[in-house]
Amino acid sequence: MSFWAELKRRNVVRVSAIYLAAAWLLAQIGDVVSQAFAAPGWPMRVLLVLLALGLPIVLVIAWLFELTPEGVKLTREVDVETSITHATGRRLDRVLIGMIALLIVVLVANRWWPSSTAPKPAESAAAQAASAGAATPASSAQSEKSVAVLPFVNLSSDPEQEYFSDGLSEEILNQLAQIAELRVTARTSSFFFKGKNEDLRVIGQQLNARYLLEGSVRKAGNELRITAQLIDALAGSHLWSRTFDRTLNDVFAIQEEIAMAVSGAMSVSLDVGAMARTRGGTTNLEAYDKYLRARAFDRQRGTSDDLVQAAQYYREALALDPAFIRAASDLYLELASWLIYVPDRVAESRQEMATILARLQQLAPASPFTMTIVANQLLEAHRWRDAEQAIAAATAAGANFRLDITSVDTIVLLNTGRVRESMPRVRQRRETDPLSLNASYGWQIMLTLAGRMDDAEAEYARSRSLSGEHGLVDSMALLRSLSSRATDPASLRAQLGTLSRDQGPVAVLKDAVIADVEHREAALTTLHRLFIDETMQNSGVMLWLAGFADYFDDPDLALAALRRAYVDFGGTNLGMIWRPYRNPLRNDPRFKDILRDVGLVDYFRDSGNWGDYCRPISGGADFECN
């Protein structure tokens, strides 16, 4: 009798199949339980190791022992003629069939059961955020140290003054956010309820905030009346209320008084003065007014026109007060975003950025604003280790980096391929600001870079109900489609057809290729022509051209475009080089050459941190990426 026949006679094959099916089911149950209780990862890893170790043990037992009418005996002690392994095998077959049926049920349920992260048509955006895990029951989430600043109502006769009431609300929020022990709901989610007549207790539950600060602003000439009140959202009662009748000259003092009163009512200490000159602020009311107007356009960020208008207001604020450090810093960061979203003005923005940095280094070289910009400059120069040190120095000086994907410290992590390390901070922004389209966009980028395409698509679907211009999230969805082998030309054509008119570099290529998406050679002819077109020579266009070339299976053009985007033109969004590709571009030696030329390989070797995608080859000077 052959060895395989003996394995089947002793039911070793059946036992192994049953064990593997049972192990898979246990692993699924363990995964569900660990997610439900937010358990750490080690119990699941221990379970998987135990299941793996159990397989050889079970196989040995099945080989050595046999079930007989007298009980379990060693197989060698049982006469083959009297063996009942055939009857035992039939019982095991029935067990195996039942296990297979259960496996099918679990697989079908997992495939078709509605995802908890998918949006429900009948739900509001706030309810979707809560169902997605952004909110928790009031008993646990609405802690004693949580507050949301609702947008103050503009009661001025001029509706155009709304930017002023919104700016006042945001400045008070910023001051309260300085309190380490206080959890302050992000602006976008708080402002979601602007103009809505919602029950304050419901708002508190949806924002996970125990306290709500609301108020109104009436501005008439130089006269100002501000009313503010603090509400216990859990009890539905007022804790504190006050009306300020002042002149416009007192606006900074009023902001501090309100923040101090709120912190006192909540029994937390506050270091006030966010707009104080020592913190890079201004005492010039007209400059402050221009700054608030700039912030209003900066928050919209729906089109490139918003970015351009915001920069203009920052310039006007600086013209009125050249020592307004916050306006200079924000103008620099605004211009840095032009490098990606306003590619036709890259040279102009770089020149102005250099002028702003020189001014800041002269006025306030030790300011955290200046030090943050220095870190950003080192980042653009691909001086990765120096950028990390500058970020540490800026943090020590008091820089409070934003918890989002545009923050310089997050960009360093992304550009050096440390996506898993940067994901928690971007996810935290998504969770504390669940109704923000920008926060959702940042989280979609992270999920895309991590290769979690299904999760990215679920978050994209959720973001469709959020307010704001959706050009950026639509572009990211397009990038995922270009990288997927499952994307057919018809669906790509439909997706290109729905893109809005102003989407930066992708708009340049959209009209050029949409007619040829079903004709690979014609599309590639167009892309090769655009690659050498003098008007197309900027990093944003080249990044998108690489995406289209990858989709049409031209790795040579894709890698050439990546090189031009990041090496020749010094593209600042280097983190996108780690996105998934249709073709194995990261295995290509030319991809590795790009990493060498932007200084990443030297950084990897010096720091010893190779990130998530590359690793050194043992025993040699080479490395590999996957």
Image (tube, grey):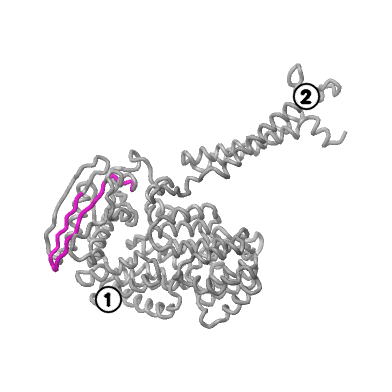
What residue does disc 1 label?
Answer: 316
**Which residue occupies 74% across, 33% down?**
14
Element type at mark 1: helix
Tell me which corner region of the image, top left, top right, bottom left or bottom right, holds residue 205.
Answer: top left
Residue 87 got which mark?
A: 2
Magenta-drawn segment: 207-229
In which quadrant of the rendered image does the N terminus lie? top right
The picture places residue 553, in percent across and down from the top left corner, at: 65, 68
- Classify residue 498 as left or right of residue 211: right
In which quadrant of the rendered image does the C terminus lie? bottom right
**Which residue occupies 42% across, 78% down?**
345
Residue 288 got which mark?
A: none
The picture places residue 35, in percent across and down from the top left corner, at: 49, 41
What is the residue that sits farthest to the right in this orientation? 1
- Classify residue 255 as left or right of residue 528: left
**Amino acid bearing label 1:** Glu
Are the residues tagged 1 and 2 within 8 Å (C-beta)? no
Tell me which corner region of the image, top left, top right, bottom left or bottom right, holds residue 305.
Answer: bottom left
- Classify residue 178 as left or right of residue 105: left
The picture places residue 346, in percent across and down from the top left corner, at: 44, 77
Regarding residue 427, the answer to whether it shows in the image is: yes
- Classify residue 229 as left or right of residue 31: left
